[in-house]
Amino acid sequence: MILKYKTMKQSLLIILITGILLGYSCREQKKEVYEPTPESLDKHKAPQWFSDAKFGIFIHWGVYAVPAYHEWYLVFYSPKASFGKNLGGPPYTAAQGDLSDSVFNANIWKDANEYHRQNFGVDFDYDQFIHMFQAENYDPGSWAKLFKKAGARYVVMTAKHGEEFAMWPSKFTPRNAMDMGPHRDLAGDLVKEVRAENMKMGFYHNTTYSFWDERFPNKEWVAYMNNSIKELVDMYHPDILWGDVLFSPERNEKGEDLGAEYFNTLDLLAYFYNNSPDPSQVVANDRFDLVKSVNPASKKAISNSIYRHEADRWKLGDSLSLIGDFQTP
C-alpha cells in the first residue's frame, strides 16, 4: 500500500514538472513581432493554407451596384472625380460646370456620362445612390454556402473601394453601411457566415488612390486611410489584407512614385501582422506601393516581378522592391 502511494506521488510529480516545462516552452515560443521595415516585413511568408487554396471568391460590391455600370462608375461619368487628385467636389455630378470643353471631355467616359444623364439626371450626385443602396436581398449565409459548394477556400470582400463608402460601421467616416444606406454591418455579417463554413475571410481596401476624397493624397487622407484599415483589422481580424493600387497615380515634386513610406504602409502591414491572433496564418498582397530595395536581386525587386513592364512604362528604375506576401496580377 505504501509502495503504491509512493508510485502515485512520483507520477503526480512527473506530471507537474512536465506541465511547468511545457508552460515555459509555450512562453518562450512567442509569436514573431514585425517592425515597420522592409527587412522585417520580408520575413513574413504566405501561410501553407494560402498556397494550398487554389480557388477563392473576390467580391466587388458596393454603392456602385445601384447604377450597375462599373465599380469605377464615379470616375467614368463625373468630370470632377478622378483616379488620383480630383478637380473639385464632392458633390460629383455629370455636369460640365466651369470646366473647359477639353478638360471636361478628357475627364469622362462619354458613354458613362450620357448613361448618367439619361437615367439619373445631369445634377444627380453620386452620394444620392447611397440612399438607394438598401441591400434588402442580401443573404450572406446563402452566399457563404454557395462559395463553399463551389470549392472556394477563401473569400475577399471590397470593404472600401475608390469611392470610399465603408461596408462596415466605421467611426472614421459617416459614409458607412451602418449609418447610411442599408443600416447594416454588411462586412461583419459576411465574416460570420464565411467562417461558419470553415473558409478564410479577407478584405480589399483602397490604399494608394481615391476617387472621392478631396484630401487625397495629403497626409490627412493617409492617416484616415491607415486608421480605416486598422479598424478593419481590429474588428474582424481578417485572414487576408488586399491593398490596391501598386503605383499611386500621384507623384512627388520630382515626378517619382510616392512610395510605401509616404502612405505609411510599412507600419500598416506590421500592424496587420502583429495584431492578428496568429501572424503566421495571415497574408497580404503586394499592392501597397514600393520601397527602396534592400536586395535588388531578390524576387521582390520590381525589375524581377510581374510588374517589370509597368515599371519601365512608369520609369521607376530598378532600385525599388515590393512588400507583401504574394504578387497580384
Image: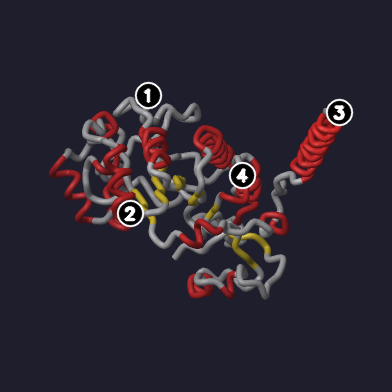
Which is nearer the N-term, disc 1 or disc 4? 1
| Identity of the residue drawn at 50% across and 57% down | 50
Q: Amino acid at mark 4?
A: Asp
Name the one closer to the observer, 136 or 314.
136
Could you tell me residue 105's position as x and y percent?
Answer: 28, 56
What mark, if any, has residue 107 been given in the picture? 2
First in sequence: mark 3 or mark 1?
A: 3
Image x and y of residue 176, in percent: 39, 30
Given the image, on which type of amino acid does mark 2 rest?
Asn
Disc 1: which residue: 179
Q: Earlier in the sequence, mark 4 or mark 2?
A: 2
**Residue at the image position 64 percent from the left and 60 percent from the top:** 291
For the point 83% across and 31% down, the residue is 9
Q: Dot 1: what SS?
A: loop
Closer to us: mark 4 or mark 2?
Answer: 4
Which residue is labeled 4 in the image?
278
